[in-house]
Amino acid sequence: ASIDAPNSSIQSENRALVVQGVSEKIVGVLGGGQLGRMLCQAASEMAIKVAILDPSENCPASSFSHYHMVGSFDDSTTVEEFAKRCGVLTMEIEHVDVATLDKLEQQGVDCQPKASTIRIIQDKYLQKLHFSRHGIPLPEFMEIDNDESARSAGKLFGYPLMIKSKRLAYDGRGNAVAKCEEDLTSAVSALGGYERGLYVEKWAPFIKELAVIVARGRDNSVLCYPVVETIHKENICHIVKAPAAVPWKVRKLATDVAHKAVSSLEGAGVFAVELFLTEAGEILLNEVAPRPHNSGHHTIESCYTSQYEQHLRAVIGLPLGDPSMKTPAAIMYNILGEDEGEPGFRIAHELMTRALALPGASVHWYDKSAMKRQRKMGHITIVGSSMGIVEGHLKSLLKEDNPDDA
Ligand code: ATP
Ligand code: MG
Ligand code: MG
């Protein structure tokens, strides 16, 4: 130890003089799912070190990370221990222990985006309150805590009525639709009852769902990715078309709303803004994610700077990259589990093998150990010279998959 000590102090002096690569900061990511995996993949190009905290030893990001701490991102002591080893703390999932993030921030830990942002976003009702106070257009909403308030919400907003759980929602788990007043009780109990914390939203009669990825640097510079169309299957994002085929005015409005929404939140990183487009050409905000998002997978192949690289640049404090598309059109298809276990793996394998033969197609497999129905297992992005062409390729891929659909 007596020999080591002077050595290490010389080393740290050298380190202060010479920066190795674009950044020596270890980026700590709470969560190690597919988004974490793609963050690690983007990081590897510039040798940025990404550490992940995830309870599952063989989570999708594990093998690509600089360091994987096995533990819960919802546990105070674990998050604190993890934060100590990182230069900046960020996340790929918003359902993290925000009280600890708050505390860490007060102790000087660098969280990007800020804990205040995560607190607002992880509770969808708080999120709605926040955005309505900031003048962002939203479907009307109301908290419900008993049958009486649920019925009066139904009278006020009409049916169908969207009931949502405030917390821990993803892929539509946490949403239930009541088609009429008689449905209210079963919809509420399907979500775990009022104790779970529920609110309702007026039904948004959208003609399309749109999304915008917004990047904000540490210097508060903001860049927006092109507006995309998202198509959901049973509440799960299934297909993304980039750019969205909507009039210029709609693109401008969607981008403005997304920009305004993100500007009301604190901290650096990429944010995804989910939007509804109504028949009348109105844009309503659905929700915001404080991290890279399914609607931005296509950016890996179709944009000059992918959302993953952009997120790393933003949280570290490097200059942001160009978010524009370098290909005229892209379509992203999520590979959702179609069956449990072995049969599910076989179906996905066949689909990917056929996709590999398609021009412009890139296959991403997340390497999750368990195959479940409706689980996001991978995705395929097809780029090409027009939306017609990439749609045609996807159609031919899926036709072979299911001849009944042809
Ligand atoms: P994610 O996986 O995007 O986090 P989530 O579980 O948070 O999803 P939401 O985004 O709230 O769920 O809703 C999922 C889908 O349900 C939306 O993309 C949309 O298709 C539909 N939806 C949500 N809110 C409404 C609404 N008020 N009116 C009509 N449809 C809605
Ligand atoms: Mg959500
Ligand atoms: Mg959503």
Image: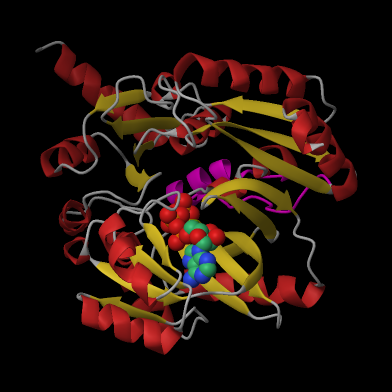
Quadrant of image for the N terminus: top left
Total numbered labels placed on residues in the image: 0
Name the foreground residue: 369 vs 103.
Answer: 369
Q: Position of residue 184 (x, y in %)?
A: 33, 70
Q: Position of residue 176 (x, y in %)?
A: 39, 61
Indicate left or right for 40 with 27 as reference: right
Indicate left or right for 106 with 198 as reference: left
Say which residue appears at 44% left-offset and 82% top-offset.
Answer: 140
Q: Position of residue 285 (x, y in %)?
A: 52, 72
Can you tell which quarter of the image residue 247 is in? bottom right
Say which residue appears at 80% left-offset and 61% top-offset.
Answer: 245
User: Is residue 185 in sight in this rendering?
Assistant: yes
Say which residue appears at 38% left-offset and 87% top-offset.
Answer: 155
Q: Which residues are magenta?
A: 303-327
Indicate left or right for 132 with 292 as reference: left
Q: Position of residue 287 (x, y in %)?
A: 46, 65
Indicate left or right for 262 with 50 as reference: right
Name the foreground residue: 364 vs 17.
Answer: 364
Quadrant of image for the C terminus: top right
Q: Is residue 309 magenta?
A: yes
Name the foreground residue: 55 vs 260.
Answer: 55
Please identify the residue farthest to the bottom as the structure is shown: 156
Q: Where is 299 relative to 144, above or below? A: above
Q: Is residue 275 magenta?
A: no
Q: Where is 305 relative to 289, above or below? A: above
Can you tell which quarter of the image residue 226 is in? bottom right
Q: Where is 140 relative to 116, above or below? A: below
Say which residue appears at 53% left-offset and 21% top-offset.
Answer: 344
Please identify the residue farthest to the front as the structure is shown: 182
Q: Main secondary structure of the magenta part?
A: loop
User: Is residue 215 in sight in this rendering?
Assistant: no
Name the foreground residue: 22 vs 180.
Answer: 180
